[in-house]
């Protein structure tokens, strides 16, 4: 083989080797880079997975922060109310109860203006006997010790038999309605068992009625004759009056004995400035002792 031909062959082989190296080089580089790329992808995937797993903790932290912010606003509102004397439901107090009534002496009077034919008799009292009462009230608690109640009371008392006989009827009763304002002072407000004093005054309406049995017809599924007591004579009055007394309470509920609900029992002296019943030697006042048990909050 001549020298020029050998040189030409050598150049061809060199060109072919260079072409092969150029073709293999990028593939090798790509293959060598793949593990790094995959590692990077794995790291990024792991990082993303970590963020996803930690998202619940982030949401909890955000929720806690919002709750803390809300409680802070509520606390600020409560502080504002306390500083500026704003009332809340904790300042509202009330009571509901019932019991019996005892009359006092012979100087009680049924009181009022007669609207009958002027029935009269020789009777000097008493003008009330025992009966029952219902009491309800609602008001404000200014402090654990001092409250003010607006009270409604209804008293239903029987009349003595001698008084009924003097009038000439067969039955009778006295009803007393009242609306009063009554302060209440708790003597031991932090104790489970406590005592209190109370008293006040207001408007009293008293109606004394005398009844006789009257036959009448009454129809439901069929008609029949029934006997009912009907009022045949009464007198009434609207007067001022006062009451005062004392009571005992027992606190209910509360983890540390701080519940607002209480049982109570009390006795009061009641005086009403009813006008005299001159036909029966009445002295012109009504006196009684209502004894009441119930709940207070």
Image (cartoon, rainbow, N blue to C red):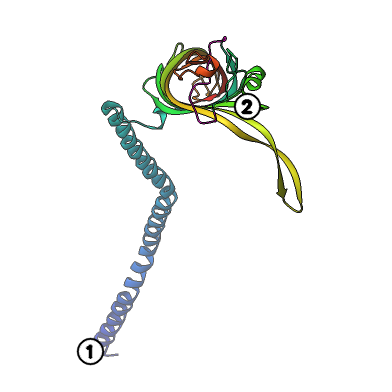
The span shown in magenta is: 105-117
Identify residue for label 2: 172
Foreground pick, 169 / 190: 169
Q: Is residue 20 magenta?
A: no
Please state the horizontal and vertical placement of residue 15, each as a whole percent of the image.
27, 81
Helix, strand or loop under label 2 = strand
Question: In the rendered image of this protein, does residue 218 appear above or below residue 173?
Answer: below
Identify residue for label 1: 4
- Few, some or many C-alpha atoms within 10 Å of disc 2 (few <14, some 14-19, many ≥20)? many
Question: In the rendered image of this protein, does residue 80 appear above or below residue 42?
Answer: above
Please tell me in which quadrant of the rendered image residue 151 appears: top left
Which numbered tag is attached to residue 293?
A: none
Query: What residue is rendered at 39% in x and 52% in y?
Result: 47
Foreground pick, 146 / 190: 146
Foreground pick, 8 / 175: 175
Quarter of the image with the N terminus in it: bottom left
Query: What residue is rendered at 40% in x and 47% in y?
Result: 59
């Amino acid at each position: 083989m001549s020298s020029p031909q050998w040189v030409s062959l050598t150049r061809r082989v060199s060109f072919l080797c260079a072409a092969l190296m150029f073709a293999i080089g990028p593939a090798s580089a790509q293959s060598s880079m793949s593990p790094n790329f995959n590692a990077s992808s794995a790291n990024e995937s792991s990082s993303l997975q970590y963020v996803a797993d930690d998202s619940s903790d982030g949401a909890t932290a955000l929720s806690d922060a919002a709750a803390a912010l809300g409680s802070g606003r509520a606390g600020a509102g409560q502080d504002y109310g306390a500083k500026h004397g704003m009332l809340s439901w904790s300042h509202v107090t009330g009571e509901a109860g019932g019991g019996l009534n005892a009359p006092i002496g012979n100087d009680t009077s049924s009181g009022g203006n007669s609207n009958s034919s002027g029935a009269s008799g020789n009777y000097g009292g008493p003008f009330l006997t025992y009966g029952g009462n219902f009491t309800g009230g609602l008001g404000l608690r200014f402090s654990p010790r001092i409250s003010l109640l607006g009270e409604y009371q209804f008293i239903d008392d029987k009349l003595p038999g001698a008084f009924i006989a003097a009038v000439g009827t067969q039955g009778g009763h006295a009803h007393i309605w009242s609306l009063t304002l009554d302060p209440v002072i708790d003597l031991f407000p932090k104790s489970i068992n406590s005592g209190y004093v109370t008293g006040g005054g207001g408007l009293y309406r008293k109606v004394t009625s005398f009844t006789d049995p009257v036959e009448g017809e009454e129809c439901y599924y069929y008609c029949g004759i029934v006997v009912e007591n009907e009022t045949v004579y009464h007198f009434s009055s609207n007067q001022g009056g006062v009451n005062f007394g004392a009571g005992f309470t027992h606190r209910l509920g509360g983890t540390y004995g701080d519940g607002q609900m209480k049982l109570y029992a009390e006795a009061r002296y009641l005086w009403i400035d009813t006008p005299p019943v001159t036909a029966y030697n009445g002295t012109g006042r009504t006196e009684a002792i209502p004894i009441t048990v119930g709940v207070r909050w």
